[in-house]
Image (tube, rainbow, N blue to C red):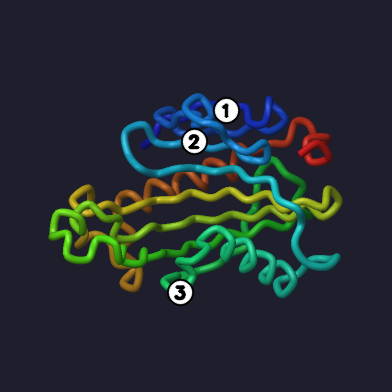
Amino acid sequence: MATYNSTPLFGGALICDLPANFVDVSALRQVPDNQEVYIDKDGFTSIIFDINERVGGPGTGPEIDGRALTTHLEEVVAEDIVNLHVWNTTPTQFSRLNQDIPAYTLIATVTPHPDPSSAGVGQQQTDVQNKLTAIILTMVRLEREKTDLLITINVPHIRGEYDEDDVDLQLGKQGKLIGDAVEYASRIWETFKVKNWGLFKEV
């Protein structure tokens, strides 16, 4: 079981528990003002908080929100959309947000395109490639603030860094890396709190 720290985000306007072994990427490189990015210092998993303009028309419901979630997912995976597989999508309850605020979480995997520039370079190039990336994407619909808050946990699976026999989502086998990420997401849903709603007018 991971150890967690209560972590302020966006200057303390938001707060939630994040794994203690994750570090703030802004200490290493520039991050856009509408993002907070944390990465596992002992691995490859990252957690991204992204404040986006709300997508779609007014109101809420599975159809409206489902279309918005699809739009955001397409932006996250960009050109890898052709290799995307969404395994499930579920409504999500945040313990410290008003229960009227809709939220949804999906689990997807993306298999990257082979790099055409590596053709003929030899086996060494393909061995270091990312075999697949699992994505746990949570969208919080803040209609009053005209905002969609995205929480994306990216879980790259690098050849040789995990047991490939443990991962087969079609058979319900998540493996350790995805299992850990699901635990991180659950902890965020339990502990995430907005301390300054004015943040969404500023970003």
Q: Which amino acid does label 3 sit on?
A: Val
In the image, which is nearer the foreground, mark 1 or mark 3?
3
- Residue 76 occupies which quadrant of the picture? bottom right
Q: Report the Cα–Cα distance between label 1 and label 2.
A: 11 Å
Mark 1 crowd level (few <14, some 14–19, many ≥20, 10 Å Cα): some
Is 89 rendered above or below residue 202? below
Does residue 193 appear in this view? yes
Label ID, residue 82: 3
- Left or right relative to 142: residue 25: left
Q: Name the residue under label 1.
A: 7
Is 50 rendered above or below residue 196? below
Q: What residue do we see at 20% from left, 55% from top?
A: 125
Q: Nearer the viewer, residue 117 or 76?
A: 117
In the rendered image, which quarter contains the C terminus? top right
Q: Which of 143 and 5 is in front in this view?
A: 143
- Left or right relative to 148: residue 119: left
Q: Position of residue 123 (x, y in %)?
A: 13, 59
Mark 3 crowd level (few <14, some 14–19, many ≥20, 10 Å Cα): few
Q: What residue do we see at 68% from left, 49% from top?
A: 149
Label ID, residue 38: 2
Sequence order check, earlier mark of 1 and 3:
1
Tell me if label 1 and label 2 are in contact, CB under 8 Å: yes
In the image, which is nearer the foreground, mark 1 or mark 2?
2
